[in-house]
Image (spheres, grey):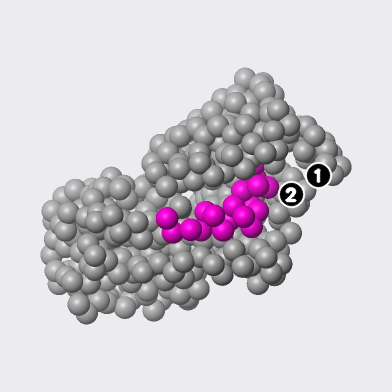
């Protein structure tokens, strides 16, 4: 298995490398909200009449409907027109920003991006984000300044370069009719899969869900999340990744279709679960499980599987490109999206079910009541249950290295 231990060539995994290199000689336009605006009233005045294009993953029907039907009308009350631009990959939005900055455009067509992780890091390294603007948002006062998920994005300091939008928790779910005695650890999940050939699989990295599953297995085979350093280094990769790829290679013959093929993404994985070809699924957006069970897509016995070793959690953000021609309008959208009213609406299970980034205990009584009134899902427990023993994301540099290592060490075994 010597090929498993080889460190992958990082360049093969970095889809944004070409535009990033092109920016080294062409920095983003100098722009800072801290100097452009002295107060929020000035932002509101400039925002009126602006059109804001929000580029975001378009494959989430609930997310699309929330933005179109709830967030957009709320933003319109401030004289701002919000247009959702669907993309299949967040990197496509960032590449557009890079291309426009390279061309010297200060009237960029991308005003906000739903972003986190490696895309945020890549943009920050290229000075593509407007920074030091989020403290101007009145709604930021309702967040916890010490919340680590809001201070660091996959190991990259946020530094006011993106506004928090919602939290997520990696979650496994299973068909309780098929698995009456489920495992309680990730190692147990892998053992269960080997004992029940063909009834388990995961999306192929670099799909987001498949990638985070691989990182969870890395934590498991390393003796726990605390044994994997957050910061990436070649030395840590060389030390820890062989056991990861060895374990996943051992698992592969027991997967759906003998590991000869993998679902391309979470949607394909979910379809296998819906068709009862497999008995477990996984998601970074567990709130979607509620509607999938209610409408009969998923088995009625679908149950969330809390793990004793916990799972990884993170936050999603709204990034504002430095060359946006609607900076004030984008700030208004980010502020409205962070308001208690919008955060509570988005948390409704039948709306989007996303976990809030607000510090609920510090909210005024009227705002806290919005969250207290949220209905309990019969499928998905509360965030406090899902996030028990949770661990944070590794630095973004780990992601392409582990994904490429999976391709060479597991897929091409």
Counting the numbered discs, the total is 2
Q: Answer whether residue 351 is visible to the viewer in this image.
A: yes
Residue 99 placement (x, y as % from top left): 56, 25
The segment highlighted magenta reads 333-350
252 above or below 51? below
Residue 137: give its label: 2
Q: Position of residue 103 (x, y in %)?
A: 62, 20
Task: Give the image location of residue 339, x and y in percent.
Answer: 65, 53
- Quarter of the image for residue 349 reads bottom left
Residue under the image location 37 percent in, 74 percent down: 306
Query: Which residue: 45% across, 52% down?
Result: 351
> Is residue 5 visible to us here?
no
Query: In front: 399, or 68?
Result: 68
Q: Residue at x 84, y 44 (%)?
A: 39
Which mark sits nearer the N-terminus, 1 or 2? 1
**Looking at the rendering, in which quadrant would you find the N terminus?**
bottom left
| Residue behind mark 1 | 40
Figure check: 372 above or below 77 = below
């Amino acid at each position: 298995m010597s090929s498993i231990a080889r460190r992958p060539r990082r360049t093969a995994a970095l889809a944004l490398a070409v535009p990033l290199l092109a920016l080294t000689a062409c920095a983003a336009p100098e722009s800072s909200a801290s100097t452009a605006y002295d107060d929020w009233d000035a932002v509101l005045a400039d925002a009126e009449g602006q059109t804001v294009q929000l580029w975001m993953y378009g494959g989430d029907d609930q997310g699309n409907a929330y933005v179109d039907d709830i967030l957009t009308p709320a933003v319109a009350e401030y004289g701002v027109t919000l247009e959702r631009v669907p993309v299949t990959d967040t990197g496509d939005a960032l590449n557009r920003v890079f291309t426009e900055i390279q061309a010297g455009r200060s009237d960029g067509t991308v005003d906000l991006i739903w972003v986190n992780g490696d895309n945020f890091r890549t943009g920050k390294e290229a000075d593509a984000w407007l920074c030091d603007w989020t403290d101007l948002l009145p709604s930021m006062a309702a967040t916890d300044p010490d919340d680590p998920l809001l201070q660091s994005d996959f190991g990259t300091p946020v530094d006011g370069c993106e506004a928090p939008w919602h939290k997520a928790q990696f979650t496994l779910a299973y068909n309780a009719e098929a698995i009456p005695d489920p495992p309680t650890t990730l190692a147990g999940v892998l053992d269960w899969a080997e004992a029940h050939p063909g009834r388990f699989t995961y999306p192929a990295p670099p799909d987001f869900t498949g990638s985070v599953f691989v990182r969870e297995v890395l934590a498991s085979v390393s003796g726990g999340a605390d044994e994997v350093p957050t910061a990436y280094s070649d030395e840590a990769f060389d030390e820890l990744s062989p056991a990861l790829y060895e374990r996943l290679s051992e698992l592969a013959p027991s997967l759906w279709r003998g590991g000869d093929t993998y679902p391309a993404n979470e949607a394909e994985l979910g379809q296998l679960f819906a068709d009862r070809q497999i008995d477990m699924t996984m998601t970074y957006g567990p709130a979607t499980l509620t509607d999938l069970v209610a409408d009969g897509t998923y088995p009625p016995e679908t149950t969330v599987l809390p793990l004793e070793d916990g799972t990884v959690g993170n936050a999603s953000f709204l990034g504002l490109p430095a060359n946006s021609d609607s900076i004030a309008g984008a700030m208004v959208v980010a502020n409205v999206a962070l308001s208690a009213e919008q955060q509570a609406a988005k948390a409704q299970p039948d709306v989007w079910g996303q976990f809030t980034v607000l510090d609920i205990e510090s909210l005024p009584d009227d705002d806290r009541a919005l969250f207290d009134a949220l209905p309990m899902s019969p499928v998905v427990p509360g965030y406090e249950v899902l996030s028990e023993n949770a661990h944070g994301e590794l630095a973004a540099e780990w992601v392409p290295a582990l994904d490429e290592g999976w391709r060479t060490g597991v897929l091409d075994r």
